[in-house]
Amino acid sequence: MKKEYLFVFIVFFAFFSCKNGKKETETLETQIPVIDIEKALDNPSSQKLNLSEFVDDIKYIPLQTISQSVIGGKHIPPVFVSENFIFYGDMMFDRNGRFIRKLGKIGQGPEEYLMALGITADEERQEFYVHDNFSRNIYIYDFNNTFKKKIQASDRGNNILSFGNGNILLIRDFFGYFDDFYEYRVINTNTGEIVYTRDSGIMGNKYLSNIQNLIWRYNTQTFYYEGSTDSIFRLKENGAIDTPRFIINLGKYKNSDSEKFIRVGEIVENSQYLFFSISAKNGLFYGAYEKQTEKTVMKKFDEFFNNDIDGGFLWLFKDTYDGREGFYSIFPYLAKERIEMLSKQNTGYDKEKNQKLRQLINNVEEDDNQIFYFFKLK
């Protein structure tokens, strides 16, 4: 009889232990804030947001166009902005847009690359890094364009970022199949060794054309959005992930077979908000997540912001080296086409700033290099 009581007690204890354990797990999960994109898309914001709520000022920088610095075409090469320089494809400019020199060597020789899908730089080491998707190597040049070495990256990558001390973070390409699947790797360029690999646990050989990972900096730290797990992490100094900061809920839009399929495009962060773009089958959307209220708002990109600063452009995305500013760029011919419409569409802006912007646009030729504009984030 005692044995029977003992058995009942053990079963009773185990049941409530499991139940309490489940509650603790659920509580832990609910403590992670959720950026609810599904709900925001189902209920888009009815009002435009004033750009001045997020941005203190905008600075416009036309990239110098001379015979050595003609970029040409109407495509956007990979871009990296550091504290003192703008790296635009194989061109190096200072932060005032003055052309300095070309970096890297395009070709099929031992010190040359074919296609730069990702670029980054380390000002302290005076090094410029190019990831070539054809050879799957990382090519390293100094700021005087002297070739230093190449490192085997072992796979295709979609973007790279310098972590300092010679460490490069390589995000895997989101097109193709992989025998050795990973989300990103940290490669040390001094030794060529892989010092960290992030494996989300997704099975290898999974087709990834609809999944994109993102990386950005804010408040001297590096953050990472993992498309396969829809999680935002802070990265430690060695590149390893920390506990999740946010969960992104795509809900029914997660299904790549759906006509409503979406993909997160860019993320910029300031003290109050996370801003993001969404590429969808039915257009481009902008969104903002307010950290304090945990509220997410979304709207079509051309209806999201009212530029009440200078009446000009509305694109806010791609962040710089430290997260204190966002930047974007526009071709002069597009700037000339859009400025009149934008000046009528936006309201409440400084007329003098608008006039200065118009003068700047009038002073560049349609086929000149792009105009960069930097948003000083609040």
Image: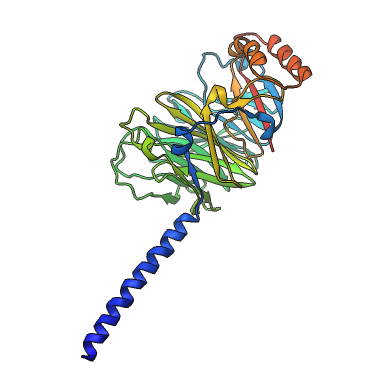
Q: In which quarter of the image is the N terminus?
A: bottom left
The foreground one among 297 and 54 is 297
In the rendered image, is residue 151 in sight?
A: no
Q: Where is residue 103 in the image (x, y as percent from the top left)?
A: 57, 27
Residue furthest to the right in view is: 352
Q: Residue 270: name its quadrant.
A: top right
From this view, report whether residue 88 is shown above or below residue 169: above
> Is 56 left or right of 138, judged from the image as shown?
right
> Is 149 left or right of 365, judged from the image as shown?
left
From this view, report whether residue 66 is shown above or below residue 296: above
Look at 57% across and 31% down and name the residue there.
317
The foreground one among 83 and 301 is 301
The foreground one among 281 and 100 is 281
From this view, report whether residue 160 is shown above or below residue 191: above
Q: Where is residue 200 in the image (x, y as percent from the top left)?
A: 38, 49
Q: Position of residue 123 (x, y in %)?
A: 64, 39
The foreground one among 136 and 159 is 159
Q: Position of residue 235 (x, y in %)?
A: 53, 50
From this view, report whether residue 262 is shown above or below residue 290: above
Q: Residue 316: name its quadrant.
A: top right
The image's colouring method is rainbow
Look at 70% across and 27% down and name the residue there.
58
In the rendered image, is residue 149 in sight?
A: yes
